[in-house]
Amino acid sequence: MLEKALTGDSKYWGWIGFLLLLIAVGFGAYLRQFNEGLTLTGLSRDVSWGFYIAQLTYLVGVAASGVMLVMPYYLHDHKAFGKITILGEFMAVGAITMCLLFVLVDLGQPMRMMNMIIFPTPNSVLFWDMVVLNTYMFLNIIIGWTVLQNERKGIHYQKWVKVLIYLSIPFAVSIHTVTAFLYAGLPGRHFWLTAIMAPRFLAGAFCAGPAILLLIVFFLRRFTSFDAGDKAIKSLAVIITYAMILNVFFLLLELFTAFYSQVPGHMHALIYLFAGLHGGHALVPVMWASVILAVIVLILLIPPKFRNNYNLLIPALIMLVLSTWLEKGVALVVAGFIPNPLEHVNEYAPTLNELVISVGVYAVGALIVTVLYKIAIGVKAEVGDAAH
């Protein structure tokens, strides 16, 4: 099937060339960081996790969201998702690859990753994060590739594949749960010290990931012969809506708990995010933009009349992705370090070098997803399952 990725029109190869250029530029910036160290980043003694780890957090959710297609299709026989389940599985492969690369660039020296393998520490949450992320990625590669290959041959997938599919469901939930435990397991960081950190992550994942997938589906519908069908689109939009409602509800729970209890450690980070603290206010516009976008998204998604209007649904999905990314891909990680134990505010901002490396990492993920989607859509067109 790989041969399908080697054929395409000028637009396809132009896109591939553009991504390779971004990867090359990002790799150049990484080599500079590799030689000079993390001093090229905006990280400091007080804020030791920044843009790289924030992207890891967001992309783990994107990867986990594949389960929102796998469960309805394989467990509940929701046939409308038949065409796009493979897209969700392949998107998870690209997302986890980016997660691993963001860990790599955050470590500064890539050989440090080997410490987790050479000196495994099962009592470390980070160790289990590595285990579940890698396992989930390989499960999606094996499942997606095998199912697609069998579809091409016109046969049903083997029983052992179904076992792997069932196994992938708890792993999808676990990758974001374990990532949440990385934060919630730090007693010195009050902002993250909440029992609903994992549910918050999962709610955000189950709306943001499918929203990205649905935007890709609309793009494929517009520019290729692939059409997922209205039933699949509307079903996924309903899932996104309820997940987004939960995402906002959990944020409100955090606000109530912090301010009603008046526990300073829990309030300070939220005050910093929404109003600024001790003269530091870098993330105030970011957080308010996230909240305002979230409110608009709910207005557009909850009424079926608006949600089923694609002219409103597409901008709503774009705003949803932006809102969740600003919250979990920018604000959540940094705010956990502010204020520091001495009640001082030392703000963090990513440097240009960090951003260029990050663009390179995103380009790697986009390249993987592009190639896998090219193969998947090519096979579906070959067997007559691309058009609605």
Image (cartoon, grey):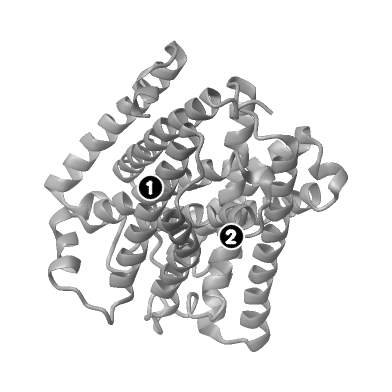
The answer to whether residue 330 is seen in the rendering is: no
Q: Is residue 284 above or below residue 234?
A: below
Residue 328: x %, y % from top left: 51, 59
Name the element at disc 2.
Answer: helix
Residue 217: x %, y % from top left: 61, 35
Q: In this view, does 1 lie above or below 147?
A: above
Residue located at (39% from left, 17% from top): 7
**Residue matched to label 1:** 141
Q: In which quarter of the image is residue 30?
A: top left
**Does residue 296 appear to the left or right of 101 in the view shown?**
right
User: Which amino acid type corresponds to the residue marked 1 in the rendered image?
Assistant: Ile
Residue located at (79% from left, 44% from top): 307
Mark linked to residue 204: 2
Residue located at (43% from left, 49% from top): 143
Could you tell me if the residues under marks 1 and 2 are in contact, i.e. CB atoms within 8 Å? Answer: no
Q: Quadrant of residue 123?
A: bottom left
Taking depth in this image into account, of 173 and 282 the one nearest to the observer is 173
User: Which amino acid type corresponds to the residue marked 2 in the rendered image?
Assistant: Gly
Q: In this view, does 284 lie above or below 311?
A: below
**Does residue 56 appear to the left or right of 27 in the view shown?**
right
Distance from Cα at disc 1 to Cα at disc 2: 24 Å
The answer to whether residue 214 is seen in the rendering is: yes
Taking depth in this image into account, of 329 and 286 the one nearest to the observer is 329
User: Which of marks 2 and 1 precedes in the sequence?
Assistant: 1
